Amino acid sequence: MLKKISFFTALVLLALTIFVVLSQASEEWSVGEVIRTPDEAFENLPDYPFSANYVNSLGYRIHYVDEGPRDGQVVLLMHGQPSWSYLYRHMIPILASAGFRVIAPDNVGFGKSDKPLKTSDHNYQMHIDVMTNFVDELALKNATFFGQDWGSNIGLRVVAERPSRFERIVLSNGTLPAAPGILGWLGYPALQLLVWSEGDVQALDPSGYSFQEYVAYTIHAESIDYAAAFQRGTTRVLSDEDLNGYAAPFPTEEYAAGVRAFPTLVASHLRQNQRVIDEFYATWDKPFLTAYGTDDKLMAGRDEVWQKVVPGAKGQPHTLVKGGAHFIQDDVPVELSKIVIDFINANLEVD
C-alpha cells in the first residue's frame, strides 16, 4: 500500500517542478542591439589574408570566408567558442587548392560578424535559425559540413533543418549535447545550480577544471584570457601573433557577450537535440565521418557514440588524429585537411 505524501513533501515537489519548468531555455528570440569590431582590429593577421564577405541573416550581418572555385564541391567549416573563422586559417588554403569551395562563417557574436551587446540576446535557437538562413542565403548544395565544438552544436542542427543542402558530414571534437526524458528537463537547471555553487571564478587552474567552473569563469571573470584558453586547447605552442589573432574580435569586454553566453547554453536544448538525434541522425545514411584528436580529453569517446548512432557512419575510415587537442585545426591542419579531402573524393558518387 502506497504511503501518503506529506503536505510539506508535496509543496517541495511542486516547487521543484515549477523551478524546472520555468528554468527551461526559451526557443523564442529577437534581434538585440549589436556592435561590430572595427576593421583595423583585423589588419595584418598572420596567415589570414582572406577577403571579407557579408550576408544579412535574420537581422544580423554575418561575415564569412569564401575561397576556392565557385563551382567546386562546397565545404562548410563551422567554428566554436571562443574561436572564429581564424581557427581554419591553415586549412582553408589547402582545401581551396584541392578544388573545393571553402566557406567559413563567423557565428553571431564572434569574428567579424555582428556582436549583440547583451548575453541574454544569445539564444541557442537564434544561432540555429541564423545559420540555417545563412546556408539558404548562399544557396549551398551538395555541401560537406565540418564542425567542431559549438560549430557542431549549431551546425548539426542546421544540417537537420536543411538536409537537402548537405551530402556529407565530418565531425571533429564536437557533438550535440542531448538527454532524453526527465534528464533532458533537469540538465539545464542542474547546470545553473552547479555554476551558481562555484561562485565568483576569476581564473582557471591550468592543471584542470570542471565544466561548471569554466561556465562560472566565463560569467564572472573581469576579462577573458584568450591566450590561455587557446594554449590550453592545443598541443602546438602558439605564437604571440597567433594568440593575438584569436583575441582580435574582442578588443574590449563589450564585444565578448557571445564568448560569455555560449557555455551557459550548452545544456539549454537537451530535449530538442535528443529528438533530432533520434528522429534525424539515427536515419542519416549519407556519409558521416569522425576525425577526433587523440589529445582532446573534453570530447574523448564522443566519436564512438556517433559511429554507433548514425547509419552513414558505417564502414567509414574514422580517425583519431595523433597530436590533435581540442582546437585540432591549429594542431594538425595538414593531416585534418587530407582526411577531409580524401573523404569527399571517396564519396562523390552520392551527389
Image (cartoon, rainbow, N blue to C red):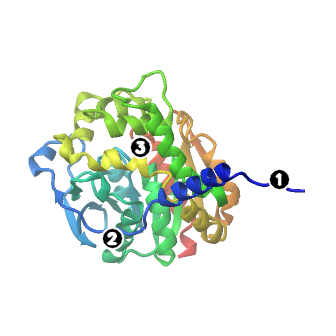
Residue drawn at the location 48% of the way across and 50% of the way down: 338
Q: Dividing the picture into quarters, in which one does residue 232 lie? A: top left
Helix, strand or loop for disc 3:
helix
Q: In this figure, which residue is indicated by the disc labeled 1?
A: 3
Q: In this view, does 70 lie above or below 16?
A: below
Residue drawn at the location 11% of the way across and 51% of the way down: 39
**How would you rate the neighbour count of disc 1 (Cα within 10 Å): few for under 14, some for 14-19, many for 20 or more?**
few
Task: Point out residue 87 in the picture as x, y percentages from the top left corner.
Answer: 34, 45
Q: How far apart are marks 1 and 2 (CA)?
A: 56 Å
Task: Point out residue 271 in the picture as x, y percentages from the top left corner.
Answer: 58, 62
Sequence-wise, which precedes: disc 1 or disc 2? 1
Q: Residue 329 carries which label?
A: 3
Q: Which amino acid does label 2 sit on?
A: Phe
Q: What residue type is labelled 3?
A: Gln
Q: Dividing the picture into quarters, in which one does residue 235 lie? A: top left
On the question of residue 287 being in view, the answer is yes
Q: Which of 200 and 95 is in front in this view?
A: 200
